[in-house]
Image: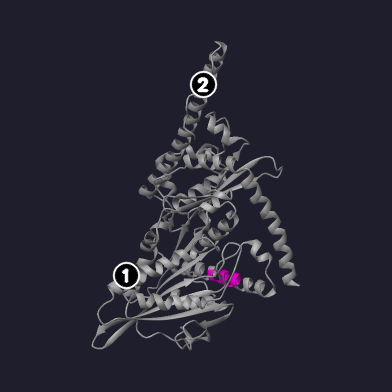
Amino acid sequence: APAAKMAVAAKDDLKFMVDKRTSRKENAEDFKAGIRQYRRALQKPRTHPRVGSAVMPFKVFVRKRPLFEHEVQKGEYDTVTCVDGLRVTVHKCTMKPDLKHMYIAHKSHYVHGVFDEQCTNKDVYEGTARPLLDAALSGNTATLLMYGQTGSGKTHTITGIVELSAHELFRRLPTGAQVLLSSIELVGNQCYDLLNEREPLRLRDDADGLVQVMGLRHTPPMRGPDELLHWISVSQRSRKSHATHVNACSSRSHLFIRLTIRLPRGRGATDQSVLTFVDLAGSERNEDTFWHDTDRIKESAQINASLSVLKQCIRLQTSNSSQRGSFKHVPFRQSELTRLLKDSFTSPAAESALIATVSPTGTDTEHTLDTLAHATVMASTDGVTRTDHQDVPIGLDEQLRRGTKSAKTRVIPPNRWTAAEVQEWLAHVSEGYASLPSGTDGKQLVRMSEIRFIQACRGDAELGGLVFQALQDQVRSINQTKVASAKASREAQIEHKHQQAVKSAGLKYQKAPRDVV
């Protein structure tokens, strides 16, 4: 019965999603024009949420993959924008309830680092995995997790990072040090040894509270990066997978690649550290889950449950690490996934990071938003998200191409912000550090002096100045957009009068070439 209810719900969701996706493609040109307008008017304040530079035990990054040519041919377009290396904005293109008017909800999310479609695997490696390799070579525990929708570039990213890590590890490995490999697959609540013919494994807590994987085999010491990568490839081929709508081989399990590094410390003593790469099971689209049988539905439910516990554990562990006197129990034992990762979060000086991969297509908008919602919860930045609404009139693309720009977009200027929008803005530019009376609206905000912002930032002159400047930059950007729009409108009027004058004189009107907006 539960499986049948899930199937019915999936069918209803599928119909709703298909309708939205169809409207996005049918109105693609106008939606793309609205996104172009938003990107031109992007505010870029000099200050960012402090999540980017804070020392945190767990960091979250987002990587956006490029739009593929075959997707463009199917009518897809780019609905994700990366800004300033810390912010990801998803442009949710939607029809209003009357099914006649359109709008775009520009939903911005902040994490510890963002990699756009121009970034290479090398760029991502340098910003995420290399610091973890440094930690492992210093004798500490380090873990990198990969999370994302099937088809979002997750496998491409982790494959590149593992390869780069292997080569740098052996370049920097001290004389006498050893690297051993083990590989674990977690399917539901059962672990398997991928280097020992998928032998089942058991987890057990030892006397020190550490989680031991009973029966897990390690390879002999690896002789170089090529041998290491060969055995990693062997383990990956043994992993459980299924075909989906967007991927012929989608992994339906969590994969752990563990590199045990034995470092000599003199007089025969050694230190041991562990560098772990975790490829979390890819989440799926609703049209894929609609065709699942009972076993697949149960499998998906187990994956979702384990990811939910992981999200909860990361958030609580991060909270415990950043606050004093307010320790909260972290439920690592609720899932085999979090039991396997417990040491990665609780070991002294442990360092961990997660890379969430996202697709840029309009078809994947809801799934991308879901991925970012999970990512920001794990980054503890879900409280600094922001949404800007923009009306998209029918024919906006044609109006912009003609240069009239008569369509009025709704990127709200600061002096029209509600009290709630003021609080949202203040939270994301100061990361919750500054405070203003709850009733402060946009009109009051734009009249505030720099000294008042310093007071709002608890006397922090530097932060107060940055927040004040951020507001000025935002106001200036809005004004520049208005000036440009007015100029374009005047030019259009002049051109129209010229056209009428030419026609009145009995001449043939020839429009001057104009750059397409």
Is 309 colored magenta in this rendering? yes
> Which residue is label 2 attached to?
510
Q: Secondary structure at mark 2?
A: loop
* Cβ atoms under marks 2 and 1 closer than 8 Å: no
Is residue 477 placed above or below 211 in the rendered structure?
above
Q: CA distance from mark 2 to mark 1?
A: 63 Å
State the image coordinates of residue 491 (x, y, percent, origin top left). Answer: 49, 23
Three-letter amino acid code of the residue under disc 2 = Gln
> Which residue is label 1 attached to?
168
Mark carried by residue 47: none
Is residue 300 placed above or below 459 in the rendered structure?
below
Is residue 241 placed above or below 503 in the rendered structure?
below
Is 189 colored magenta in this rendering? no
Q: Residue at point 66% right, 55% down?
A: 17
State the image coordinates of residue 381 (x, y, percent, origin top left). Answer: 49, 58
Q: Main secondary structure of the magenta part?
A: helix
